[in-house]
Image (cartoon, rainbow, N blue to C red):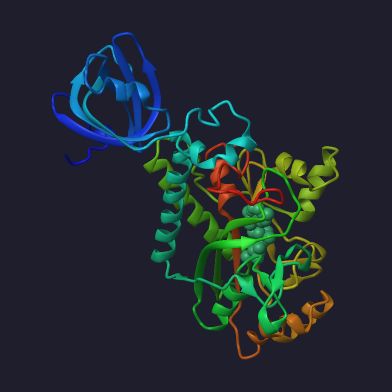
Amino acid sequence: MARTHITHLTPNTTGAIAGFVATKRVLKSVVFLIVEDRTGSVQVTVDRTHPLAELAVDITPGSAVRVAGMVTANPAVKLGGIELRADAIEVASRAAPELPIDETTAPERQLDWRFLALRRPSNRLVFEVQTTVERAMREYWAEHGFIELHSPKLMHSASESGSETFSMPYFDLGHAYLAQSPQFYKQMAMAAGFERVFEIGPVFRAEPSMTPRHATEFTSVDIEMSWIDSHEDIMQFEERWLRHVLGAVRDRHDIEVPVPEGPFPRLTFDAAHQQLRDVGHPELDPAGERLLCGDGFLFLTDYPVELRPFYHMRENGLTRSFDLLWRGIEITTGAQREHRHDVLVRQAKEAGLGQSVSYYLDFFKYGCPPHGGFGFGLARLIMLIMNLPSIREATFLHRSPNRLTP
Ligand code: AMO
């Protein structure tokens, strides 16, 4: 019999389902199995007098099973008022007795048994929402003339600051580094005349940070656009794009997401510092960012040169750059880039970078349009949309200094 998803079971028809046994209850006259697939869960009922009773009693929670039988309306069943009265049960894969985790297990141990934790519908929803988010991002880019990139993750040099790179021996070329961002290559696409590009891909940071916002490997969402006048163009693009993405989540899922109407507030780095000093908080640290931002979105702009990488365009000791905060957490860094070869070479030298980035500096030698873009942490957005305690729960498999498994 063809498989029916649990959500499509209809009373007074026969149905064949496939899924995991969530719970088993053995009573004197009957065995109840709750079976779950990705669409829902249903009670399977087996009378103790039925030839299948022995098999049902013996089934372990977690087992993967196929069950066929008659779908029957039964108002006494809490789960949708129906039950499946089993005529056939096949144990496709029997679970070992005693599952190692349940809903009450501590977070780190949940990560040890991530595949079991992910069976819970609330965890699956996180990735259904992530699918919607990425689809909406791509929809918006496709409508606005963007080309998708897949840039290499093995690099000759660090792409951001040098201290946070993973390195490994690389044949006769000495060392390779894992990309910390597609920064250099998305800019190369501007020198190649692509004008508008995006990439969703893995990046790697050898940061010892164990905060709820940091991972050593994460999915970075990057864009780059040519022929901009300033970082303001990039911020305006991000507002429209994010509105489309959050709107898609609101429309396609039963969760509350704010979709801000107008432009997001903007505050220069200097003004932000002043505001914080006025309330007795001298630092623009994560706590300061939360104070400034509240529950909404906030662009912090015009960071001082010392706080930004060499490739940001500079003006009067400041950079044409921004961070986007949501609910006090940084989700984006962006900037207009320095596209003038001579200026960029000087800034690279001042940052102590020479020969190692010469291939990158070459991108700007033969004409390059003014351009800018941003990098965006996918898991941070998902964490905030879903109100999760950390990006660990917003990532399929988290990577941190003390976690390489599963
Ligand atoms: P930045 O280093 O700020 O900028 O990274 C961009 C965005 O990526 C997210 N992020 C992280 N997420 C999880 N774990 C981490 N360890 C982590 N580090 C950063 C944040 C952050 O805003 N090349 C520039 C971007 C650009 O200018 O285009 C860059 O990489 O959401």
Q: Residue furthest bottom?
A: 366
Give the quarter the ligand 1 occupies. bottom right
Q: Hey, which quadrant is residue 145 in on the image?
A: bottom left
* 92 vs 82: above or below: below
The answer to whether 393 appears left or right of 94 in the picture is right
Q: Is residue 324 visible?
A: no
Q: In front here: 214 or 340?
A: 214
Residue 331 lies, in percent from the top left, at 62, 52
Residue at left 47%, top 48%? 130
Counting every numbered tag in the picture gives 0
Q: Position of residue 361 (x, y in %)?
A: 69, 83
Q: Quadrant of residue 124?
A: top left
x%, y% of residue 45?
27, 20
On screen, residue 43 versus residue 121, left or right, reads left
Asked whether the viewer can see residue 171, the reply is yes
Identity of the residue furthest to the top in this view: 28
**Split into 4 quadrants, where in the image is the N terminus?**
top left
Q: Residue at x 73, y 46 (%)?
A: 210
The reply, left or right, for residue 23 in relation to residue 196 is: left
Residue 70, above or below 144 = above
* Pick the front one: 95 or 134: 95
Q: Residue at x 36, y 38 (%)?
A: 38
Say which of 59 and 109 sits in front: 59
Percent x, y for residue 406? Answer: 57, 48
Q: Quadrant of residue 101?
A: top right
Give the side of residue 317 with respect to residue 226, left or right.
right
